[in-house]
Image (cartoon, helix red, strand yellow):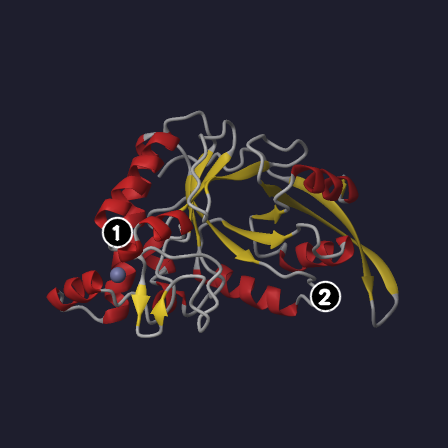
């Protein structure tokens, strides 16, 4: 396993003033935590322990590797490729895994994880990006779009040839791809991580994301748990606790912090609520200026 450089330091010591609604008491929470930021600009954001940036987004647009940044590659979400190669799109009895499928509510278009030509393109991108002066490679959208996917002709034929259970087969497809990517990234001596969708119990049967087989290949996991408000946080703690109990790998949670988004006090309450169970928080501001403003309002000591 590559020695961890994500991030090098121990994180910020954070001081957050909390207000207990029932008792009306103000109190301070102080703890040490790593704070990262997800931005749309390929420049490290000052004041954070690390910066993440999409070198390939779900639109299909591919950017140059971003120096001194964790470069994110969205794998099987790719609107551009879905448009150019409709025969590569994941499909099921409920239709194609695209934004136009009104019964499913997909936010982007999904490519079938068994298209070898597409996977080769992704692995080449991972290889080229890993060779640049970056602080790590992160893969997002690594799995199938849902429990009924993929039932395209390609997958149906491949699955018929195996003696495997459907869920085991799906998760093997995902883990095998992540394993190949991990090998490439490690050859280039860079930290490697993947996103797990925010389901600590059924990620394997829904998306083929088997936390236990994936953890052998990654340096850490990121779980995005987005909400526009974080007006309550008990559910956030429930999800994060469940992930924490199932893996000893470093765990980072990505919180939504763009504009419009949660109030600063709600965001801070969310950070406090999960701070005991995570190795770091990533604030998904998608904008460096918003990130700097939030950073200014967080008190470090
Ligand atoms: Zn398929």
Residue 205 in view: yes
| Location of mark 2 (residue) | 231
- Image x and y of residue 126, in percent: 35, 37
Q: Residue furthest right?
A: 24
- Image x and y of residue 152, in percent: 24, 65
Residue 176's disc number? 1
Report the quarter where the C terminus lies: top right
Mark 2 crowd level (few <14, some 14–19, many ≥20, 10 Å Cα): some
Relative side of 163 to 235, left or right: left
Name the one closer to the observer, 19 or 206. 206
At numbered mark 1, what does the secondary structure look like: helix, strand or loop?
helix
- Image x and y of residue 9, in percent: 58, 34
Position above or below: 69 against 54 = above
Name the one closer to the observer, 286 or 33. 286
Q: Residue furthest left?
A: 161
Report the quarter where the N terminus lies: top left
Residue 215 in view: no
Relative side of 193 to 45, left or right: left
- Image x and y of residue 95, in percent: 35, 70
The residue at 37%/53% (across/down) is: 142
Q: Residue furthest top?
A: 133
- Where residue 145 sits, quadrant-wise, is bottom left
The residue at 57%/52% (across/down) is: 254
Q: CA distance from mark 2 to mark 1?
A: 39 Å
> Which comes before the other along the chain, label 2 or label 1?
1
């Amino acid at each position: 396993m590559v020695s961890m450089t994500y991030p090098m330091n121990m994180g910020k010591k954070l001081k957050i003033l909390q207000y207990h609604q029932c008792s009306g008491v103000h109190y301070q929470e102080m703890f040490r935590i790593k704070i990262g930021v997800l931005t749309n600009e390929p420049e490290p954001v000052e004041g954070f322990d690390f910066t993440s940036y999409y070198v390939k987004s779900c639109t299909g647009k591919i950017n140059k590797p971003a120096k001194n940044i964790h470069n994110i590659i969205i794998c099987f979400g790719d609107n551009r490729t879905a448009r150019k190669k409709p025969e590569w799109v994941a499909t099921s009895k409920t239709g194609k895994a695209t934004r136009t499928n009104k019964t499913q509510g997909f936010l982007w278009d999904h490519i079938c994880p068994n298209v070898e030509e597409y996977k080769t393109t992704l692995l080449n991108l991972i290889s080229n990006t890993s060779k640049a002066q970056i602080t790590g490679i992160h893969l997002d959208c690594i799995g199938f779009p849902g429990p009924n996917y993929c039932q395209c002709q390609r997958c149906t034929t491949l699955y018929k040839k195996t003696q495997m259970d459907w869920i085991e087969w799906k998760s093997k497809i995902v883990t095998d791809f992540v394993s190949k990517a991990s090998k490439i990234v490690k050859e280039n001596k860079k930290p490697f991580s993947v996103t797990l969708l925010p389901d600590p119990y059924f990620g394997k049967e829904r998306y083929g994301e088997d936390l236990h087989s994936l953890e052998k290949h990654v340096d850490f996991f990121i779980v995005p748990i987005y909400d526009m408000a974080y007006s309550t946080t008990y559910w956030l703690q429930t999800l994060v606790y469940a992930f924490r109990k199932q893996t000893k790998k470093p765990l980072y949670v990505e919180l939504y912090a763009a504009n419009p988004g949660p109030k600063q006090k709600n965001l801070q309450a969310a950070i406090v609520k999960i701070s005991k169970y995570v190795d770091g928080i990533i604030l998904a501001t998608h904008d460096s200026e918003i990130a700097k403003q939030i950073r200014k309002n967080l008190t470090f000591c």
